[in-house]
Amino acid sequence: MNETILEVPLTLRRGGRRTDVERAVSDSLKLERLVCRSLNIPDLTGMRVLDMGCGWRMSKALLDSDIPIGAYVGIDVFAESIDFLKSSVSDERSSYHLLDAHNEMYNPTGKTLCEIDSLPVPEASFDIIWLFSVFTHLAPHDYKAMLKILRPYIKPEGKLLFSLFINENTPNGMGFIDSVTRQWNLNTPGAAQVNENAAKYFKEKKVPEFIDFHPEQPLKWALYSREYALELMKGSGWEVESINFPEEAIQHYIVCSPRASE
């Protein structure tokens, strides 16, 4: 890895790796490689990428590691973070925009996603749109709204990739619900956080369409059934190419292409 290019103040970091910068960068690099592998491309050379809900980690990873990329455009609701990135990143391939969308922690007075009809970027200009740790915190109505917001900005042959919590056990045991199942079976303290809907799933083996898994902290974990995740894609202008099991540094992730007729 090259010498550090971007030093991000602790006050502007967020997420589970906010105090472990090395791990945050490592995870981001794994995500970048996963995107390339999923889309069957060697790297991001020549690719215009839109990172919706960009945060700070991917910018630091791309810059510090000198990852080849055509253009990187980050959009986020956290004004202080966007201001910092605009003033601190001089790489001409990178640009950043603030979106006045509601977020309880970072932009509580922002508009709902249903009220947003455009983004501050040119339409049909991105080869790749990715969202990491965004849909994992969206309620169903915002899930659909986000898909519709993004659709105009993808190129005809472009791809959308986003991570999601899907309510199912996985072959490799790396999913969110695998962890919850282990806690439940072991009767550990974490199992006490399972809400009534989740408890019903474990008791009756029925998978609810959607669970706000930790309602004391709304949408900390937005958990979807596989069937409902697919149902919400209908009419969004996107066609699902694959739903993929969790891997290191990511939960389930969905790869989509734009529908030509929408």
Image: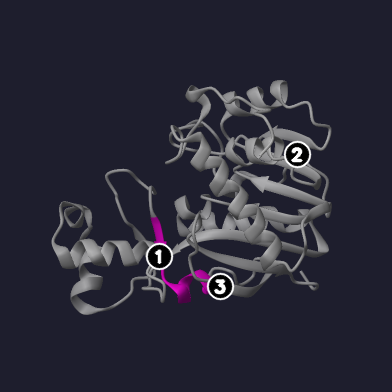
Nearer mark to the viewer, of 3 and 1: 1
Task: Bin the neighbour count of mark 3 within 10 Å (Cα to Cα): few under 14, some 14-19, many 20 and up.
Answer: some
Q: What range is drawn magenta here? A: 222-231
State the CA–CA distance, disc 3 to disc 1.
13 Å
Of 116 and 80, the residue lying toward us = 80
State the CA–CA distance, disc 2 to disc 1.
34 Å
Of 92 and 231, the residue lying toward us = 92
Ranked by sequence position, the earlier of labels 2 and 1 is 2
Tell me which residue sits at (73%, 27%) in the image. 89
Q: Is residue 230 magenta?
A: yes
Q: Is residue 19 above or below residue 169?
A: above
Task: Bin the neighbour count of mark 2 within 10 Å (Cα to Cα): few under 14, some 14-19, many 20 and up.
Answer: few
Which quarter of the image is occupied by the C terminus?
bottom right
- Mark number for residue 244? none
Nearer mark to the viewer, of 2 and 1: 1
Q: Is residue 87 magenta?
A: no
Which quarter of the image is occupied by the N terminus?
top right
Residue 30 visible: yes
Ranked by sequence position, the earlier of labels 3 and 1 is 1
Residue 108 position within the rendered picture, expressed as x and y whole percent measured from the top left: 47, 32
Dot 2 corresponds to which residue?
120
Dot 3 corresponds to which residue?
243
